[in-house]
Amino acid sequence: MNIIHRKGWEIPERLATPEHLFLNRRSLMTGAAAIGAGAMLPSVAFAQGKDPSAGLYPAPRNELYKLDRALTAESVTSRYNNFYEFGSTKFIADAAQKLAVRPWTIKIDGLVEKPRDVDIDTLLKAMKLEERLYRLRCVEGWSMTIPWTGFPMRNLLDFARPLSGAKYVRMETFTDPKVAPGQRQVWYPCPSSTGAQSRRRRTIFHSW
């Protein structure tokens, strides 16, 4: 008889995220700190090889987020990942270097008090960054434990200042098939997007 002894962190298969939702969530990693994607603005500092946001890291750690195991090695977490804009394999870190992250501008529009474009470094300085320790578990069978630096969604909403009639947030990634050839694929929803619906004081994420 084959007896399966489950580990403490395992969950029943029925509770795993459906594959179609997982595949669409890839855009969240690309645009979680943005509402929309806009035109590029010049950044002299980064053009000279200096990261304008370098002084913001490391961010203070939020001790509410704890792990019961060691962090996954950075050599793994920085190279084994999904980025379907550049290919369907997990080893696309080198190809993804074609994406220039500076200069980068975020477009905030829709039902907001003042539609505007904001440089990513201006946005980062306006947010209160924090580090959280997260466990990632993929439906494909791999998992990682990583330190993640960012800011709560509510801080971005406070910055965007949506009107009272706004009910949804749509976050859209960049579109540039010349840089990201994966966006030419017929199965790839380009530009990909992730949405959120606010219910009282909670934020519920949706993908489409």
Image (cartoon, rainbow, N blue to C red):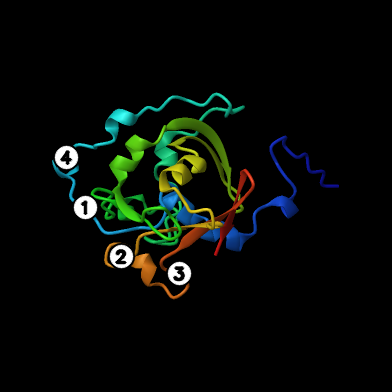
Q: Which residue is mark 1?
A: 41
Give the amino acid type for the residue marked by disc 2 in the picture.
Asp
Label 2: how many Cα within 10 Å (few below 14, some 14–19, many 20+): some
- The mark that comes first in sequence, 3 or 4, is 4
Nearer the observer: mark 3 or 1; the answer is 1
Q: What percent of the width, then of the height, locates residue 100? A: 26, 52
Q: Which residue is mark 4?
A: 45
Instruction: Tell me the quarter of the picture where residue 38 sits.
Output: bottom left
Nearer the observer: mark 2 or 1; the answer is 1
Q: Which residue is mark 2?
A: 176
Label 3: how many Cα within 10 Å (few below 14, some 14–19, many 20+): few
As drawn, which residue projects farthest toward the right?
1
Q: What percent of the width, then of the height, locates residue 106? A: 33, 52
Residue found at x 24% / y 56%? 40
Q: CA distance from mark 4 to mark 1?
A: 12 Å
- The mark that comes first in sequence, 3 or 2, is 2
Give the amino acid type for the residue marked by disc 3 in the picture.
Tyr
Q: CA distance from mark 2 to mark 1?
A: 16 Å
Q: Is residue 108 left or right of residue 139?
A: left
Give the amino acid type for the residue marked by disc 4 in the picture.
Ala
Q: Is residue 36 left or right of residue 6?
A: left
Q: Which residue is mark 3?
A: 188
Nearer the observer: mark 4 or 1; the answer is 1
Q: What percent of the width, then of the height, locates residue 179? A: 28, 62
- The mark that comes first in sequence, 2 or 1, is 1
Q: CA distance from mark 2 to mark 4?
A: 24 Å
Give the amino acid type for the residue marked by disc 1 in the picture.
Leu
In this rendering, is residue 36 above or below 74?
Answer: below
Label 1: how many Cα within 10 Å (few below 14, some 14–19, many 20+): some
- The mark that comes first in sequence, 3 or 1, is 1
Name the quarter where the C terminus is drawn.
bottom right
Secondary element type, mark 2: loop
